Image (spheres, coloured by chain):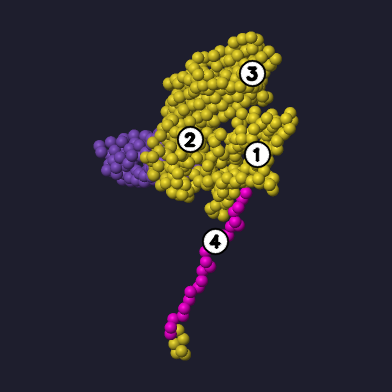
Amino acid sequence: VAKLCVCDLLVAQCDVNCCCDPDCSAAEFSLFTTCSVPVVTGDSNLCSQKAAVYSLDVEADPPERIFELTDQVNPSVFCIHATNYEQALSFSSPEIPTSENFDQLLEQFGSAAFSAEPHSWNMNPDAQHPSDANETYRYEYGAPVQTVDAFLRLPSPVVSSWCSDVNPAGFLVNQATKCTRSVSVETCGSIPAVSMGFYINSSILAVKFVFQVNITVQSIVVQSLNGTRTLLNGSDVLRLPRILDELCINTVFRVSYHITYTDAGEIIEAAAAFVLGAINKEALSIQQSFEISFTQVDTTPVPLSGNPGYVVGLPIRAGFRPQGYPFPGEMLFAALVLNTNQYNQLTILQSTSSQDCLAAQGARTPVLFGYNMISGCKLRITAATKCQPLTQTLLDVLKGQSFPEYVASFGNSQAQDVLDWVPITHLYTSEERIYNTFQSSCQIPVSLEIEVKWTKYGSLVNPQARIVNVTATISTTTLKQLPSGRERTIPVTSSVVFTDISSPAEPGYKAWPTINVKLPFDFFFPFV
Amino acid sequence: LSSVPLQMLLYINGVYYIFYFLATLAMIVYKSQVFSYPDDFLAPDLVLLFMMAILEVLQLYLGSKGNLTEEEAPLGLSLAATVGSVLLSVYFLVWQTYVLRADVIISAVLLFTHGLEAALKVIAIAAFVS
């Protein structure tokens, strides 16, 4: 009873007005006004039980917390003097289903009603102290990931956008947070949260109290002041922030933790990838972003976009047929190369703030099912631009580096099922009617329109989306020769449209039952 | 000569036992409603209560008969039944599934009267044998 504290909600921090919180020191007790939890007792049905009484002595200066462990007596004549039945006064923990007892549990609890107690009690729960149960060291979903000193911190914005360092990372909870931290060039060496060491110093405990797992540095990307990022080769060196030429370099801008766990709830590997940057004299604060993701050991997760039909908002899965199979008509396809990297799926051009097609650096955004998108950029042509390289550049800008050949018709299509994949049809149209085809002119592609036709498939009650046809139409326009010195800007657009071509559903009903009655042959015997 | 204290005690015991039986039955019903009282534990308690009732009736009848007819044999059997009754009342005092304070009180009183009865029966048997 002395260890139970209902108001102790913050880990490793003192809760206000919580007199039973073990994290509070005497100085913090002197700031409390009342005790939110004055008494913690066991079951009040018992004739005598232990009670932990917490109170604040406000007369003393400074106020102190008084803790007494007393025996509370129940005066009623029907109080429980003794029980010979252990599980009488506590909630019973149900049996955890494993592969051995699953059948027996299913038989017992699988029907609409079952008796309150199972046949055998093979667990002996400790009713008084459920929190320090020694049988589970492993992590459970949401439990804070413990490290040697406290817990793995994922700084996140709390009330405002300023970073708070006391947000623990929960096990199996994939999170991404962004927050602002105030730094300046002078103090950048003294703030621990902008140095790499802060994030990889303390090693994670693999199971709650036993083994330690060191956090390895997976990769370091250095970002310069104008935004260019370079991946460093040797990522073993710990780069601490230091002042160089009025800039503070090696400040942490982004940390991505990748934690590998087993299905027994143990953490076996932890890696952190950093993006380090530089801050200059004028900067008063930087924005840091943090991410943590958990993967199970020996698995490579392939995200599905629906099961089986596409879910609105998830990216369309696409792939290529590997080289060497020149017979598109044959059914002997090899497995289609499934692209798990999101930037290799069906993507369209992403509009950037500079609106310049050539400076876009290949920024592309994945096509999400059900979301019609349109994007574009502007291309500046001078007199000196040549037709053929311009055409190639525009095709690259519109289609991207690896435009896929096939699109999955269901959200969970496997690469082996070739019939589940829909080929992308390419069409070329011209914006202007060419009346005079003999005049050789330069046709440059200026727009890409992808039309995805989808239909509803399956039952009436729960229709699933299925992609039936994908057509990519490239429209070209004539490039007129410019007089030298002049320049022109042409807009380049790409769009994705989703069209629902499902035919109206006709419910199929069973045939009405007919009454099939035939009177016997001699029913009207005497008369017929 | 029949022992008057023994007869008085047997009479009082009879009346008290009716009260005890009804009270214990009522408290078992109360316990089964208020607390978690699974069938595995409820059944033995009820069975033992009814067995105790049978033993008590036997013991009181045989004791009274033996005392009044001044014979040792019924008194001896009654003593044996008293031993069983004592054991059962100890069960209801200590080993029941839920022992309430009221249970403790009435079982202690029953145990006390049984003890006194047993002593008086032994004395009566000694008196009748000689």
Quickly name the residue at label 4: A508
- Label drawn at residue A88: none
Residue beneath the point at 49% across and 38% down? A338
Q: Would you call the spot at circle 3 few (<14 residues within 10 Å), some (14-19), or many (20 or more)?
A: few
Residue beneath the point at 54% across and 40% down? A404
Q: Earlier in the sequence, mark 1 or mark 2?
A: 2
Which corner quadrant of the image does residue A177 belong to? top right
Distance Cα–Cα, label 3 vs label 2 = 35 Å
Q: Earlier in the sequence, mark 3 or mark 2?
A: 3
Residue A475 image offset from top left, x and y in percent: 65, 43
Please give the chain letter of the residue carrying mark 1: A
Tell us which disc is closer to us: 4 or 3: 3
Distance Cα–Cα, label 1 vs label 2 = 46 Å
- The stretch drawn in magenta includes residue A12: no
Tell me what hue chain A is rendered in: yellow
Please name the amino acid that badge 3 sits on.
Leu
Region in magenta: A499-522
Residue A525 image offset from top left, x and y in percent: 44, 87
Query: Same subunit under labels 1 and 3?
Result: yes
- Label drawn at residue A301: 2
Residue B37 image offset from top left, x and y in percent: 45, 41
Quickly name the residue at label 3: A225
Residue beneath the point at 56% across and 46% down? A425
Distance Cα–Cα, label 4 vs label 1 = 56 Å
